[in-house]
Every structure is written in C-alpha cells, then in structure tokens.
Image (cartoon, helix red, strand yellow):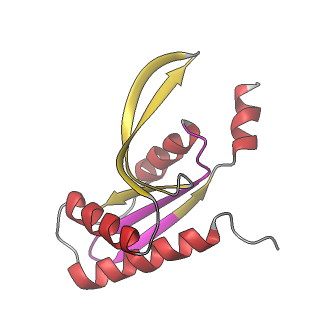
C-alpha cells in the first residue's frame, strides 16, 4: 500500500487540530479556531496562509473567487467548521476548492461538540481527465 499523499503534513495538521480542540473546546466561531490553527501550524515551522484567495474559472473566464481558511505548504487546503455535524455540503465545498486549484489534499476540520474531520484527495491527474472530457 502506498503511503498517503502528504501524510507528514496531514499528521501534523491533525495533531494541531486535536491540540487546539482539547485546549479551546467547542462553541467558538470558526474564525477563533482558524486563528488558533494558524498560530499552531506556524509554531511548528510550516508555511501557512490564512484566507488565501483562490480564483475560480469556467471556460477560461473568471467566474468567482473564494478564500480558503488555511493553506499549508501549498499542499493542503484546510476548511474549518464549527457546527453540530459535518454534512455532504461541507465535503462538496472542499472538493470544489480542490477542483479549482492544483492542491490535491483537503482536510475538513469540525470544531463541534465532538471533534470530527474528513480527509479528501482529488489528484491533479483526475482534474486533467475531467477537463479533457
């Protein structure tokens, strides 16, 4: 079995996630958790960008933009939620963020009453195949 794509970074993010969750608990706004994750990941020596602008194109025309909560090492998009349960719309949101970039790994982190996360992979070769159809 091949090792997971960007496993070392993913493991560090998940460790930071549980450290932040255990210290802050649940009930804060997403921005509080985003700021804490940003500080924790920076303290670990990673290149971290908060609210990174990502442009979305349709038929080579700019149709919108979004701001990723956190991008780490330009390899993983982190989407932070503070809700009761992760829902399919949250997963679809992160999947679309991956589709719009060259980033292949997404982590959806929920700071709800119970900690919950999802790891999503959308490889660039799949994105190219989709564009060529």
The residue sitting at the front extreme is 45
- Residue located 69% across and 37% down the image: 127
Spot occupied by residue 99 in the image (x, y as percentages of width and height): 57, 39
| Bounds of the magenta segment | 101-118
Of residues 40 and 5, the one nearer the viewer is: 40
Q: Quadrant of the C terminus?
A: top right
Residue 40 shown in magenta: no
Residue 107 shown in magenta: yes
Of residues 77 and 91, the one nearer the viewer is: 77
- Residue located 25% across and 84% down the image: 23
Residue 82 appears anywhere in the view: no
Q: Main secondary structure of the magenta part?
A: strand
Spot occupied by residue 114 in the image (x, y as percentages of width and height): 32, 78
Q: Is 91 placed above or below 86 here?
A: above
- Residue located 55% across and 44% down the image: 98
Spot occupied by residue 75 in the image (x, y as percentages of width and height): 57, 55
């Amino acid at each position: 079995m091949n090792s997971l794509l960007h496993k070392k970074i993913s493991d560090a993010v998940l460790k930071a996630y549980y450290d932040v969750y255990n210290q802050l608990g649940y009930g804060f706004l997403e921005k509080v958790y985003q700021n804490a994750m940003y500080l924790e990941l920076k303290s670990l020596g990673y290149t971290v960008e908060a609210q990174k602008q990502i442009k979305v194109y349709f038929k080579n025309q700019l149709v919108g933009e979004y701001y990723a909560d956190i991008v780490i090492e330009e390899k993983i998009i982190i989407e932070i939620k503070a809700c009761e349960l992760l829902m399919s719309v949250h997963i679809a949101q992160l999947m679309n963020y991956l589709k719009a970039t060259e980033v292949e790994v997404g982590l959806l982190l929920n700071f709800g009453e119970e900690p919950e996360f999802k790891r999503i992979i959308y490889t660039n070769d799949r994105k190219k195949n989709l564009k060529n159809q």
